[in-house]
Structures are given as C-alpha cells and as structure tokens.
Amino acid sequence: MTQYAQTLALLKANLKRDWLKMTIWLVVLAGMFVAVAAKFEGIYGTPKQISTIAETLKSQAMVSLFGPMTTAHLNTAIIFASEMMVFWGIFMVIFNFSLSVGATRGQEESGLTEMVLGGHPVGRLAPLAAAGLELVIANGAFVIVTGAGMMVANMPGSDGNGNWLFAVTLGAVGLSFGLISLIFAQLVADSHNVAIYNYAFFGITYLVRMMTDVSNPDYTWFSPFGWIEKADIYTKNNWLPVGLLLMLGVVGFAAAVILNGNRDIDTGIIQVRGGKRTSRFLRGSGTLLFWNQKAISLFWIVGMAVLGASYGSVFNSISKIVNDSPVVRQVLGQSGVRHLEQNQILSFVGILGVIFSVLAVVGGAMVINHLYTEERRGYLQMINTKPESRSKLLATYMVYGFVLSVIILFVALMAAMGAGNSVLKHPLAFKYFWRLFIAMLPTLALFTGILVALIGIMPKWRAVVWIALGGAFVISYFGRLIDLPAWAMKLSPFYWFRKVPLAHIDVAPVTWMLGIAFVMIVIGFIGYNHRDIES
C-alpha cells in the first residue's frame, strides 16, 4: 500500500484547487436538469401535448439526436428521459474529461507531480488514485443533487426508482469516461494530446450510438455511451447499464495503474519523435503554431466530416411521417408532399447548423486558448525575445483559430449535404447549405471576439466563453422544448438565424454581431499589449 501513500492528502489538495470548477459545473448541470424537470409538466403534461412531441421524437432525425423511443405508454417523465438522457450524458463526459486531464497531465506539466513525488513520502500511484477519487466525489455529488431534485420535481409518470436510476446513470457514464481518460493520460505526454485521444474515443462511441440507433437499436450495446439509453428510465428501469459502466470504469482505472508503472514522470508510453535541428516551421510564430496544431486541426476536420456525413445519411428517413400518411398525400398532392418533405429536412438542417457551429467554436477556441496556456507555462519566452509584437502574436492565434472554426463548419455542412443528397430522391440545393454557412459566421466571430477580449484583459476568466457558448446552445436546442420566454430565447446568438435555411438571412443581427465582435477584438488587443506576460 506504500504505492498509494498520502492519497487522501493529494485528494484534499485537488479538491481545494478544483472546488470552484466543480461547483460551477454541478450548479449548471444539476441545477438546470432539475429546473427543466420541474417545468416539464407544464409543457408536456396533457395527452395532446405528449402525442404531439412523441411523433417528433419518433422520427429518424430525432432518434439520431436523442435516441429511440419505442414505448407505447407515454407520459411526461418518459418524454423527459427521452429528450434529456443523451444530451446530459454528453455534458457529463465533457465535465469528467476536464477534471481528469487537469488532475493528471495538467499536474505533471506544471512540475507539481515531480516535486511532490521527489520531495515528500508520497506513493507513486497516489496522484493517479487521488484523481480517480476526485472523479468519484464529483459524480457522486451530481447524483445526490440530481436524484433529490428529481424527487422534489415529482413529474407525472416518474417514480423513485426511475429518478435515482436517471441520476446514477448520468453519474456512471461521466465517471466511466473520466476513468478511461486516465488511460490516455499515461499514453501521451501532454494535456493537449490527451484531449485529442479523449474526444476521439468519445466521438467514436457517439457515432456508433447514433448510427446503430437509426439502423438497429439492438447494436447500440456496442457503444459504451449507448448503454445509457438501455436503462429504459421510467419504463423497465434497467440497472444493468449502470453496472456495465462502473465495470468499464474500474477496468479503465486498472489499465491506467498498469501503464503508470511502466513510464517515467512527465513522459508517456507513446514516445515523442525528435524533431529536426533546423526547420522551416521554426521561422516564426505562425509556422510554429501551424506545426503544433496540425494534428488536432486534422482531427477536427476529419471528425466533423464524419459527423456531418452521419447526420446526412438519415435525411431520407426524416420525411417518413409524410410519406406514410395517405391523407397528407391525397390532400397536398405530389408537389405539396415534396415541398413539405423538403421543409422538414431543411428544418433539421437548421438544427444541425447550430450543433456544427458550437463544435466549430470549440475547435477554434481551443487553439486561441493555447496562447495563454503556452504563455503561462513559459513556452513563448523564446518568441517574446524576438522582435515580434504582441499584436502579431495574438493575431496569429486568433486568425488561425477563427479560420479553423470556419473550415470545420464548412466541412461539416458539405459532408451532410453530400451524404444527404446521396440518399434523397430529390436532392437539396447547395444554396440552402451555403446560406446556413454564411448565417453562422457572425456567431463564430462573436464568440471568437469574446474569447480574445478575455485573454487580453482577464485571461483567468477565459472559461466564461464556454459558459456563454453552452448557455446559447442550451437555449437554442431546448428553448422551445421547455417553453422559454421570448426574451430568454433572444439571449442566444443562434436565435436570430433560427429560420435559416428556410428563410433568407436577416442583415440586422449580422451587423450588430460583427460590430460587437470587432469591439471585443479591439479590447482584447489593447489589453494584451498592456498587461503583464505570465510565466
């Protein structure tokens, strides 16, 4: 047990460091989850309301987003579980990735792990064990708050078993993926690449879940992320997926322990190849940034192309409600049915535009964030000693991040169009996808401007951009479902382009969004040129 000596002391230090992050995440995730549950009866409390939303959720488009809903005896609680399980599962995975990377690779990169192990009677596996226990505590707190909140909400059709199963399943999927992240923290030597491995693994499991849900839900068992759907909340209340997720997490932690014993501190199992002494990629900050970011950029582009194509492949299933209705065909005629089918698909494309835009912002913002990360770790000292202005350095990261986000969005939409038109009898015109692409550009610029301003004047508060982005996404994605008031809907930049691509772009929101983005960028550059550089 000497290998785990002082684990509790390190756990206490981790909690002291991460308490604010954990509190914010738990308040946002658990608080919003319970708040939506409490309000759901007023939105889908009558048989008519349930019937209306059920038809939508049973369409192939919604199945690809939320998972299948096959039960015939629907109520408010079942509708809630169908809409929220996959979506909140994604948030739980992201939350746990953030904690696990910070508690492992983040600590080693800062030199803290080496200092603790070298100068104190601390076991070799204590930092890893402390990281695992921190994940257990964070997810346990979520389960307690969420489960108790669901009991208080008392939705029609809910029961104690289903409420706690719901909370425990979400906690279990977060914990499982967080512990698996510890494996990747042993494989590679920096948090940047750990994040790549984390989200690549999660992306694969999500795509497998989405494609199997649409084609054959029985195959969803092949995806660990798909197990959360098999809990059948408020119907069968199956606890087997919870057990499987916990077993997967234990296996992941055991594998991380084995790998940890076979590497040195501040290194990874996968060795880094030595670079050339002279390279054209070391001539300036721009080429150096491109060289360092080329792998993650390619990962984002390829991953978004796959995601876009996966969603596009279900376009032919979206119009089944119309095709299967003889009354609709008789009343509208062939041309009317075709028009209605196209409108249904384009409405779904509009939803995809929001999803792709959020992911595009994430991809670009991760690059821009590296400016402060590398500044804080002292990586930019050699660049700062050269006759290169701070403005040029900030502009390099900003332009690269924004261009990457634009490419990610464009590739995702084009992949969706290509895959969708290949399965449709009447392909969608390119103009609709181009219109949606142009409409989303101001939102990309707006969030880029906010991040640049934060890095320039308050870099330690740069995480605010993630809160703003997440809030905008939740409002746009769930605003109508939870019947948010009009003023709340307008807080999301995506709201102003909600009718695109069915309708043309409104010039007014484009103008004020670009104006705000420009002002934020100017503030960021002024602040960056006047504040102290950290190291």
Image (cartoon, grey):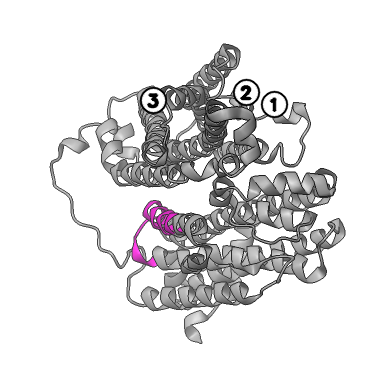
Please name the residue that numbered disc 1 is placed on: 490
Residue type indicated by callout 2: Trp
Q: Position of residue 466 (x, y in %)?
A: 57, 40
User: Where's the C terminus, which quadrant?
Assistant: top left
Magenta region: which residues? 186-204
SS assignment for the magenta stretch, majority: helix
Q: Is residue 278 visible?
A: yes
Mark 1 near mark 2, Cβ–Cβ under 8 Å? yes
**N-term-proximal mark, 1 vs 2:** 1
Residue type indicated by callout 3: Ala
**Mark 2: few/some/many CA within 10 Å (<14, 14-19, 20+):** some
**N-term-proximal mark, 3 vs 1:** 3
> Could you say which is closer to the camera, residue 434 or residue 181?
434
**N-term-proximal mark, 2 vs 3:** 3
- Name the residue: 45% across, 39% down: 372
Residue type indicated by callout 1: Lys
Residue 270, by quadrant, is bottom left
Judge depth for marks 2 and 3 and give the one in front: 2
| Badge number at residue 395 | 3
**Mark 1: few/some/many CA within 10 Å (<14, 14-19, 20+):** some
Local secondary structure at mark 2 = helix
Please name the residue that numbered disc 2 is placed on: 496
Local secondary structure at mark 3 = helix
- Name the residue: 55% across, 45% down: 61
Mark 2 near mark 3, Cβ–Cβ under 8 Å? no
- Name the residue: 59% across, 39% down: 322
In the figure, 177 relative to 51: above or below?
Answer: below
